[in-house]
Amino acid sequence: MGSQSSATADRLIDFSFYQLIEILAKKYGVDIEDLESQLMEESLFQFSSNPQINFPTSDIEKIRIIEKDMQTQIDIVVNFLGLQGASGPLPGSVLNEIAYESHNQETIKATYLDFFNHHLIALLHSIWRKYKYYIQFKKNVSDEFSQKILGLIGVNRKHITAIDINWSKLLFYIGIIQSNVRTAKVIAEIIQHYFDLETVTIDEHERQLITIDQEQRNQLGSKNMQLGDNFVIGSVITSFTNKFKINFHNLDTEQFQQFLPTGKKYKELKEIIRFLLKDQLPYDLCLGLHPKTQSNFVLGNEQSSFLGWSTLLNSDPTKLIQMEKVTITGQA
């Protein structure tokens, strides 16, 4: 047996048509991106047009919410569009006849026309929705428009699910990313916005020790012995060409722990940097804490007793030692 919720339906009449459809679709967890292509018997909504030719007082004339066989159907009668009713395009004599029959509970013609009205009204809502991105948008960027925008930077559906990145936070910077501008300031700004941090800076041309390939090392009396050309002492050489350092400033204790290699945001940070860099250059990560941050080191507490990261030894109990920064080297 089916049941109707008339009290709820009466209150819903006060909503505008477009707003009501969005609210009900969200409440019942229904995807309405392709509302106009859904079959009437499979759709949550059943649209029809008011056959009366009186002056309408609202977008919606009547709503019925029917619960039947563990399924919900919402019948919505509108006043603003349809083949019959006050806005109908049919000849006046036909509209008057349909209105008279409807008043006398004879709905054969109106029901027949509502088959077409349902698809017209559903199509109208899809047209209204098309250019309102803020309504189409979904947090997991599964909506069609977001995926088309991400396609401009070479991200397809497989990338969205395979890479641990919150793509919705990158939509604001799609234009910059698509233009292949990868300055230090741009990357720092994107990271700062992505993780909602106070300040992020990047130091370029950091010192890096590069191991010399065995074939390029000098061998006494054999090769690579020309002074000023290919003669190098040792097995490593200092370079300031490729490496850079990312600095996070004024982190609190919780943020600091999240960006440690054991934290939940560390992997996500590496993914976003790997995505933003055109060339996968080596970098260091410097986590700077707020000047007033104190160590929360507690012996035995796995969340605070990280050797070299969050542990401090103080031989003078009267002196307060503050944590400043931790540098995690060799990231790439």
Image: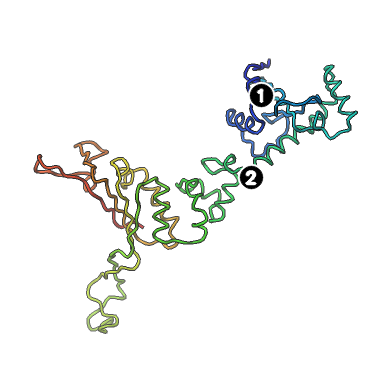
Q: Amino acid at mark 2?
A: Tyr
Q: Secondary structure at mark 1?
A: loop
Q: Residues within 10 Å of mark 2 (few under 14, many from 20)?
A: few
Q: Nearer the viewer, residue 225 or 293?
A: 293
The picture quadrant where one finds residue 245 is bottom left
Quarter of the picture containing the C terminus is bottom left
The residue at the point 79 percent across, 29 percent down is 114
Horizontally, residue 4 falls left or right of residue 173, namely right
The residue at the point 51 percent across, 53 percent down is 174
Q: How is the image coloured?
A: rainbow
Whole-percent x and y of residue 71? 64, 23
Position above or below: 43 against 107: below
The residue beneath circle 1 is 13
- Sequence order check: which comes first, mark 1 or mark 2? 1
Position above or below: 92 against 256: above
Q: Nearer the viewer, residue 17 or 274?
A: 17
Whole-percent x and y of residue 284? 31, 57
Q: Residues within 10 Å of mark 1 (few under 14, many from 20)?
A: some
Horizontally, residue 288 falls left or right of residue 266, namely left
Q: Residue 254, labelled with which disc? A: none
Q: Residue 131, labelled with which disc? A: 2
